[in-house]
Image (cartoon, rainbow, N blue to C red):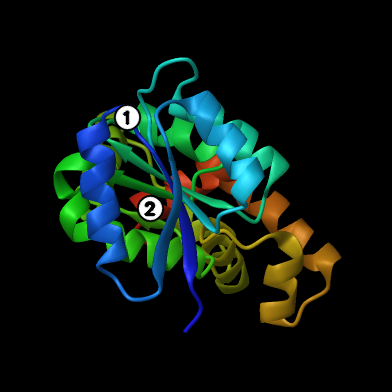
Amino acid sequence: MKTIRILLADDHTVVRKGLRLLLESQPGFLVIADAANGREAVAMAEQHMPEVVVMDIAMPVLNGIEAARQITARQPQTAVVFLSMHSDEGYVLKALKAGARGYILKDSAEHDLIHAVQAVSDGKAFFSPAISKMLVEDYMRQMQKRQVEDSFDLLTTREREVLQLLAEGKNNKEAAAILNLSLHTVETHRSNILQKLNLHNGAELTLYAIRKGVIT
């Protein structure tokens, strides 16, 4: 079993200690460092090269969103999981745009954190069930309010396959290898998906996939 090396970042010492105990109770999980603010998290991620960073959004000196943006830009192989009290869509979209692969609510951390770390270290995405449920319900309400048809049915079978892989965090090259397609073909599918669904970037694509239950 490979060891998953984890960096913790939260400005509350008690929270960090609790998270460390929870994570290290799991075989194969090792907390290699912890940080009290976003700037420390960026520095420690660069120093220790963890597989996973578990990070609060609201932190002093440098907030979690900006810290995640810097970490994922410098170390794309490091997966970030956000712990947050906020369950609204705006925060989730900001987290995804910053490169996060997981987003879990603090009040469900005890149940979700182990699954989240395992999922993102395997290259998948993970969101608290409450987050996924909220996004799906909110999306349904918006559709009814605007009285518009969902564009998901416009996607071809192949485009739906590409959508899922990209939303799970695979890049175009990885998706091409899995589907046995050329890179150019996957890039064309991605472009068509964004156009058909009126999406503008990978973060919006992932958010859409959660809303539709394509990934959970």
Q: Could you tell me residue 3's position as x and y percent?
A: 48, 73
Residue found 25% across the figure and 44% down from its top: 17
Whether residue 161 is visible, yes or no, is yes
State the residue position of label 1: 146
6 or 159: which is nearer to us? Answer: 6
State the residue position of label 2: 210
Residue found 73% across the figure and 61% down from its top: 172
19 or 126: which is nearer to us? Answer: 19
Find numbered disc 1 in the image and state the secondary structure of the residue it sits on: helix
Q: Quadrant of residue 111?
A: bottom left
Residue sitting at the far top: 61
Seen in the picture, residue 126 relative to 7 is either above or below; the reply is below
Left or right: 44 in relation to 185 = left
Whether residue 200 is visible, yes or no, is no
Residue type, mark 1 in image: Arg
N-terminal label among 1 and 2: 1
Residue found 52% across the figure and 29% down from its top: 40
Q: Could you tell me residue 65's position as x and y percent?
A: 48, 28
Residue type, mark 2 in image: Ile
Seen in the picture, residue 119 relative to 145 is either above or below; the reply is below
Q: Nearer the viewer, mark 1 or mark 2?
A: 2
Q: CA distance from mark 1 to mark 2?
A: 20 Å
In the rendered image, which quarter contains the C terminus?
bottom left
118 or 45: which is nearer to us? Answer: 45
Seen in the picture, residue 134 relative to 10 is either above or below; the reply is below
Q: Could you tell me residue 133's position as x and y percent?
A: 21, 50
Find numbered disc 2 in the image and state the secondary structure of the residue it sits on: helix
Q: Could you tell me residue 52's position as x and y percent?
A: 49, 55
Check disc 2: other Cα within 10 Å, few if <14, some if 14-19, many if 20+.
many
Left or right: 76 in relation to 105 = right
- Circle on res. 50: none
